[in-house]
Amino acid sequence: MDLKQRIARWMEDHRGLIVVLVVLPLSLIFDALIQLRLWIIRKFISAPEKHDERVRTIQSQVLRWNKHPKAERKLMCTARPNWQSLSTTFFRKDLCHKISIPLYDILELRESHMTIRVEPMVSVGQATAFLVPRGYTLAVCLEVAEATLGGLAMGVGMTTYSHKIGLYQEGIVAYEVVLADGSLVKATKDNEYSDLYYTLPWSHGTLGFLVELELKIIKIKPHLKLEYIPVKGQKQYCDMMRDLSGALDKNRPTPDYLEATVYNREEAVIMVGNFADVPDTEQHKVFQDIVLPMTQLEDQIDKNEELFDIYPILIYPCRIYDHGPHRGQLRPPRREQMVPGADYGMFNDLGVYGVPRVVKEKKRFDAVDAMRKMERFTEEVGGYPFLYADTFMTRQEFEKMFDLMAYDQVRRKYNAEGAFPHLHDKIKPEIDVVEVGKQYMDPL
Ligand SMILES: Cc1cc2nc3c(=O)[nH]c(=O)nc-3n(C[C@H](O)[C@H](O)[C@H](O)COP(=O)(O)OP(=O)(O)OC[C@H]3O[C@@H](n4cnc5c(N)ncnc54)[C@H](O)[C@@H]3O)c2cc1C
């Protein structure tokens, strides 16, 4: 074994070390330089208004190539170096006549058509940064930020939204292409270049030079709710993927995003993503910490099951003191709740966090009604909810649960009135409880 082979073997045996100490830092630097290059292009060279002029320059490069004697002509390809491309095949561009395609601009957002016009070197990340703040995304949008919209159009694109739309090419409305004779044509589904429209995808730049794309966009919501579903059994996860994707029934409502990671033959996690507004994500969750007497621990657990059926729930004990004449907002424990011989009762925090079972089962859930019942139970047993979470009590109910006599006196004494909001005003729902109750009952 010569020295070169030995070094290669050593590097293979220690590939973890090489990756951490060499590859990762180098790729970080490489990424930073690429980002810097793109930033310079966008900042100093970007000029959508010069699009037509740039296309003419590309046409003239092709026309010049046409002037070479046929026998001397090398085949044409884009001048983009292989190292910049995400493709892992390395085509011998050095043997070709290279045509420079410096087209990096977003040209026009056509909201009325739900499309966007872009130049081919616009990256997925660039398009997303432009579209998302405006409430849109590409109809087929890869998670690979560096991929170019032109590269995907000439190659192929598929993503976790594709069960709804299809391949990336299904989201392309029009291609503008410089053909081998230097002419510029626009290919759409139903114009005279429709044959080109259908053959440009998967053509990898072997039919012409792409200079513009018109792509479909879709509306998005500000959030994406992701659900991770672990599934055991090959048949189970395969069946679930077929069902969720709509492969078995075209009328089945499908999630916005769908993918699975298979960890071994029998174990997979299926990921389901749906666009969501903040309230839709929040409204079906319960966050409650309630201070309740341990004398009624069984009743607490039963009540949780009756109203929310969320498990696991959290329980940890806490002394609640009877401070005698020194009143605060907490009413002292009732006589039967006191620990024998002590000046305190043993209460506990009941922590209920999560999604009620009926919501998981996609059935109706009246969150306000459930919360109101929990509040009534809390009041009956002499407990009190933490006030960081939603409470729906009226002022009267609130004053029944909490003792506000000393509080009101102290507010007057220390000039808090008129300076700070009243406790109930601060924690009461900002919303119309009845209205929200109706919304909460909307099916998912
Ligand atoms: C880790 C990884 C994960 C990936 N995951 C996915 C995935 O989930 N889904 C998916 O669809 N793809 C995926 N890809 C593939 C990737 O999206 C493709 O490589 C894609 O081609 C985009 O790369 P690019 O923008 O660098 O295009 P390039 O590789 O530069 O271009 C693709 C082809 O189009 C030609 N071309 C590009 N621009 C023009 C032009 N203006 N005119 C004429 N011809 C042109 C090129 O010559 C080339 O043949 C993944 C790639 C990697 C490395």
Image (cartoon, rainbow, N blue to C red):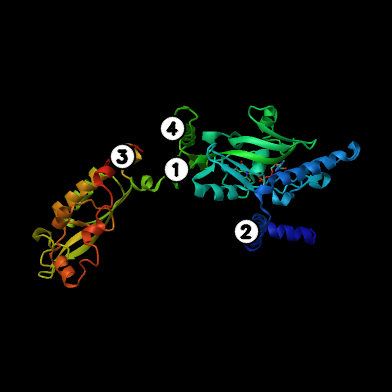
Res. 16 mark: 2
Local SS, label 1: strand
- Front residue of 2 and 85: 85
Q: Residues within 10 Å of mark 1 (few under 14, many from 20)?
A: some
Which of the two labelled residues, at mark 1 and mark 4, occupies the earlier sequence position?
A: 4
Please give the residue where the numbered disc 4 appears in the rendered image: 253
- The nearer-to-camera label among 2 and 3 is 3
Please give the residue where the numbered disc 1 appears in the rendered image: 275
Please give the residue where the numbered disc 3 appears in the rendered image: 358
Q: Are marks 4 and 2 in contact (CB under 8 Å)?
A: no
Up-down: is 416 above or below 153? below
Mark 2 residue type: Gly
Q: Are marks 1 and 4 in contact (CB under 8 Å)?
A: no
Q: Residues within 10 Å of mark 4 (few under 14, many from 20)?
A: few
Mark 4 residue type: Pro
What percent of the width, then of the height, locates residue 315? Answer: 26, 56
The quarter of the rendered structure image containing the N terminus is bottom right
